[in-house]
């Protein structure tokens, strides 16, 4: 049995223009020791998917489908039981550490808290363990940091503290939602390497969310490409990059920023914008921006077509697309 099994996950949010599905029919499984990437443009539903897994959805969100952790259904658990799991069996690293750290509590206390709460440690033992964790995540001078406050640390240091907190109880599942977006490029690489080392060291499952295809290519074994709330392509990362089978994946790839000397060619972009939730079309969500669109694309959400071992695409022209390039 996989550690995490998601089936037919749909999340409907209340927007000021009526209800809209931020996540549509998402399904995947994730095992211990596995790394899975989730990539897509802003607004495609990545964070809502992560929040659904953690049962931290916004008020008035409706959830349908199934999320099982070690065979246990999470969508029907009460808040008490969920609190017992969050921070213990599953933990999340958020995009902006400043908004997730408590500004008026010391670093030491915040890292120790899950240990006291979930592991029943004494304050002294938890403080000792917090020191080990801060050391492990590479925070310089960890002993002195225990009694400091978040504003006394740099962005990269705060993100290391968030990672220490997420890892405190040795979770089985770690969700990292754009863990490096707020950081500069050199620090980004260090933090990603740290997360990967820790995932390997502890045999956790990692769901890594990023809008950056390069990050996904370098850090994950399998990947899902999301658009308009649905997973439009998924598969082993190397296989997806070798045979991109959805026009949206190809668009993202063509639009990725490249390193190296500036050239005369302007950066390619995908024309058009991500649809608003209340305006999602009944057919393929990407149809109105897609260079390959044909009338049947508007008939309904395309089913997942098998493209290779464990590789699917929700594009009715996927076979032609792969054959043509
Ligand atoms: N609390 C909310 N109420 C209503 N709509 C919301 C809420 N939070 C997010 N949304 C909408 O849900 C959709 C998916 O949002 P989500 O935050 O999951 O995107 P994302 O892929 O994480 O984007 P980003 O890359 O910008 O973080 C968007 O259309 C967004 O506007
Ligand atoms: Mg997000």
Image (spheres, rainbow, N blue to C red):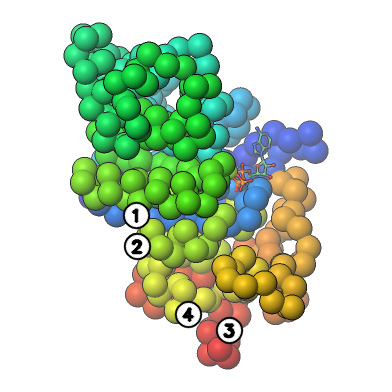
- Residue nearer the viewer, 180 or 287: 180
Residue marked by disc 2: 221
Q: CA distance from mark 3 to mark 2?
A: 23 Å
Q: Secondary structure at mark 2?
A: loop
State the image coordinates of residue 182 (x, y, percent, origin top left): 56, 41
State the image coordinates of residue 233 (x, y, percent, origin top left): 51, 66
Q: Which mark is in front, 4 or 3?
A: 4
Residue marked by disc 4: 243
Q: Is residue 302 above or below residue 231?
A: below
Local crowd at mark 4 within 10 Å, few (<14), some, or many (≥20)? some
Q: Secondary structure at mark 3?
A: helix
Q: CA distance from mark 4 to mark 3?
A: 9 Å
- Residue nearer the viewer, 250 or 294: 250
Q: CA distance from mark 1 to mark 2?
A: 5 Å
The disc at residue 35 is 1
Whichever of labels 4 and 3 marks the residue nearer the N terminus, that label is 4
Whichever of labels 4 and 1 marks the residue nearer the N terminus, that label is 1
State the image coordinates of residue 138 (x, y, percent, origin top left): 32, 37
Q: CA distance from mark 4 to mark 2?
A: 15 Å
Local crowd at mark 3 within 10 Å, few (<14), some, or many (≥20)? some
Q: Is residue 242 above or below residue 230?
A: below
Q: Secondary structure at mark 4?
A: loop
Residue closest to the far top: 123
Residue at disc 4, CB closer than 8 Å to ligand 1: no
Q: Which mark is in front, 1 or 3?
A: 1
Q: Which mark is in front, 3 or 2?
A: 2
């Amino acid at each position: 049995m996989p550690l995490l099994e998601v089936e037919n996950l749909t999340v409907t949010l209340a927007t000021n223009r009526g209800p809209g599905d931020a996540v549509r029919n998402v399904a995947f499984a994730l095992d211990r020791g596995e790394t899975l990437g989730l990539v897509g443009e802003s607004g495609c539903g990545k964070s809502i998917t992560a929040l659904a897994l953690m049962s931290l959805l916004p008020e008035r969100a409706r959830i349908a489908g199934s999320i099982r952790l070690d065979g246990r259904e999470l969508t029907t658990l009460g808040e008490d039981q969920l609190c017992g799991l969050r921070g213990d069996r599953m933990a999340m690293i958020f995009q902006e550490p400043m908004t997730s750290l408590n500004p008026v509590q010391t670093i030491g206390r915040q890292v120790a808290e899950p240990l006291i709460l979930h592991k029943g440690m004494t304050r002294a033992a938890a403080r000792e363990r917090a020191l080990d964790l801060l050391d492990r995540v590479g925070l310089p001078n960890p002993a002195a940091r225990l009694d400091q406050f978040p504003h006394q640390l740099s962005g990269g240091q705060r993100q290391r503290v968030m990672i220490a907190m997420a890892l405190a109880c040795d979770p089985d599942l770690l969700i990292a939602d754009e863990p490096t977006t707020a950081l500069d490029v050199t620090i980004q690489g260090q933090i990603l390497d740290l997360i990967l080392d820790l995932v390997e060291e502890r045999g956790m499952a990692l769901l890594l969310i990023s809008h950056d295809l390069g990050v996904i290519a370098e850090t994950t074994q399998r990947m899902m490409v999301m658009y308009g709330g649905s997973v439009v392509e998924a598969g082993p990362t190397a296989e997806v990059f070798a045979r991109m089978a959805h026009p949206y994946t190809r668009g993202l790839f063509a639009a990725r920023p490249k390193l190296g000397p500036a050239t005369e060619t302007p950066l390619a972009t995908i024309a058009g914008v991500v649809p608003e939730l209340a305006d999602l079309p009944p057919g393929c969500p990407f149809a109105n921006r897609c260079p390959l669109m044909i009338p049947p694309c508007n008939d309904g959400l395309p089913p997942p077509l098998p493209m290779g071992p464990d590789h699917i695409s929700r594009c009715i022209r996927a076979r032609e697309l792969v054959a043509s390039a």
